[in-house]
Amino acid sequence: MKLGRISVATPFGPVTRLVAVDTVESRVIDLATAEILRLQAKGATQEAAQRFASAIFPGSMSAAIGLGDIFLETAHEAVQARADDASTATSSVNWLSAIDPPVIRDGLTFVKHIKQFHERIGAEPTEALLEIPGYFKGTPFTAVGHDAEVPKPFYTDYFDYELELGYIVGRVCHNLTPDEAQRAIFGVTIFNDFSARDIQKLEMKIGMGPGKGKDCAFGIGPWIVTMDEIGRLDDLEMAVRINGKEYSRGDSAETIWTPGESLAYMSISEYVQPGDLFASGTVGNGSGLEIGRKLEAGDVLELEVSRIGTLRTKIGPPEEKRWWPERRRKFW
Amino acid sequence: MKLGRISVATPFGPVTRLVAVDTVESRVIDLATAEILRLQAKGATQEAAQRFASAIFPGSMSAAIGLGDIFLETAHEAVQARADDASTATSSVNWLSAIDPPVIRDGLTFVKHIKQFHERIGAEPTEALLEIPGYFKGTPFTAVGHDAEVPKPFYTDYFDYELELGYIVGRVCHNLTPDEAQRAIFGVTIFNDFSARDIQKLEMKIGMGPGKGKDCAFGIGPWIVTMDEIGRLDDLEMAVRINGKEYSRGDSAETIWTPGESLAYMSISEYVQPGDLFASGTVGNGSGLEIGRKLEAGDVLELEVSRIGTLRTKIGPPEEKRWWPERRRKFW
């Protein structure tokens, strides 16, 4: 099943809705609406059906996933029963980030990207990459969905994209083995880890991970493909287009760590949450850094992954610069 | 005002409650209970009063702060009206982390700690620290409150504490100036950035910030002191005790960046949330690393800050090791 989040205008303001995506018929099915119709046909009052449907299909995809198996089971039943009565054409949909993750984590697992990235910056990879599946954490509050506009940050001269797979966690994970962790993955989406390369370089000197280098935006979408539907994860083909022109192709083969190993590591001593997103790190050829292309205002970026879809983002003009720190005097 | 979160046992399982803390009378006041009594005296039915009180005083402190000024105004009114009828002795309280932050950020701002830390590790600080108020992000799902037990992570031989101030954000912050950011701070608490030094060192080589080095636990509490009550932030005195013995003292003087500057930087291109916690970085003498003391199972750690209180944590035995990554073969 393909699952997404959309925003719908109402007389009381915009409302977030969970939808199933039917790519064959180019339509989305409003899950709560379909479920209300299904329940009413089984004797529920409209009020009770609404109460039940909004508990199973709230606006938060993470909250829905947090309900466990009943979420996906009910989604299948609702779509099977009443898809035709709860559909909207995909063309008229206002997409939100496919998941609203409590925590975003992002690793570095694709062998080809690691080689190419380090050739480009003229440095050898650290052997620590071979010891642990390290990762950084991003703020979830700049996540955007398909067809969003992302302002080029005012503080960067090198705005870049990173084409990645985003794995969505299905359960609370704590001290799992890789096998257990693999089974705890709910689905996969396209993840764009936007990067401001110049400030990222400065932040890396401090050693606390990226802040302004990454947290300006994360593209997530267009929808989540559940694990039973996506099948294998190591044969996905990927393409990057800017303004309609293909700039690079890659695939999901050859990683240092499997998704299950990455998630198992993340779960050690922590409580990874249902709806958390952890990303694969950039696929080979998946960043502008590898091909010498910077993003500028006006660019339209498309990241395509086979069996998932295409995540499109428009780069907008910078926001106004209101403040930036001035260098302090050396005190040592 | 001092505000905290506690867990209360009920016939239907544990419930999280927001409380005001009265340190003079050694009691906590259940805010929803006091508000229900106040509303009933003004003509509300019990059901309506409960509905209103649970909307203003939910279990989530972040959600309460997200309501804006009405949260603190109503808390004052409720306490003033009915504190005596909604009180419990502090001694019998089960504390939770004072805040449930959507995002935890933690910087490095205390001049004395930066000097001492780098002397200890035998390296010069990076000048990048003088250019930007860098920070890392921690997972909020291992936050614990006063009197919690934290297992020593099984993967570390050097478990450490870091005594810090934790600032609680009061509003959505986006591209703020330092003055605006300073006014957006809701209150301050004690923050213990537990650290596994050996794995932290390995993770720093990867350059993506700490994962297992920090996310095993964050101590937050015992309560939040609002900005109007705490007054100045640069004259707080701090002490570290382990098993009752004082190990070090510090103070909050001399930072590279003010809290307002740190928050302004965090807000650039991001949306910092109400209830987010950002920490000051370790105060001088605030870590075991500076004095050669490691935490071991059985230790009782107390971090005291003047005008706030004492945050106590017991170090427990390690959890079972179920998996740890094996080193991969070099591929470059």
Image: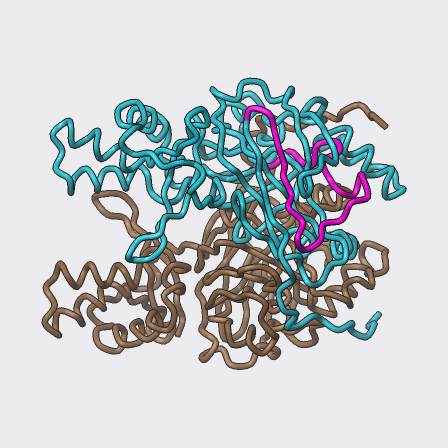
Chain colours: A brown, B cyan
Question: In this rendering, would A103 be left or right of A94?
Answer: right
Which residue is drawn at the image coordinates 57% and 62% (left, top)? A278
Judged by its main secondary structure, the magenta piece is loop
Image location of residue A27, percent across then percent down: 32, 68
Which residue is drawn at the image coordinates 57% and 57% (left, top)? A192
- Which residue extends farthest right? B122
Q: Is residue B95 magenta?
A: no
Residue B264 at least partly seen: yes
Which quarter of the rendered picture does the C terminus of chain A lie within? top right
Read off the magenta span.
B278-307
Q: Is residue B300 magenta?
A: yes
Image location of residue A256, percent across then percent down: 72, 72
Q: Residue B145 versus residue B195: which sits nearer the camera?
A: B145
The answer to which quarter of the image holds residue A324 is: top right
Image location of residue A274, percent across then percent down: 46, 63
The answer to which quarter of the image holds residue A85 is: bottom left
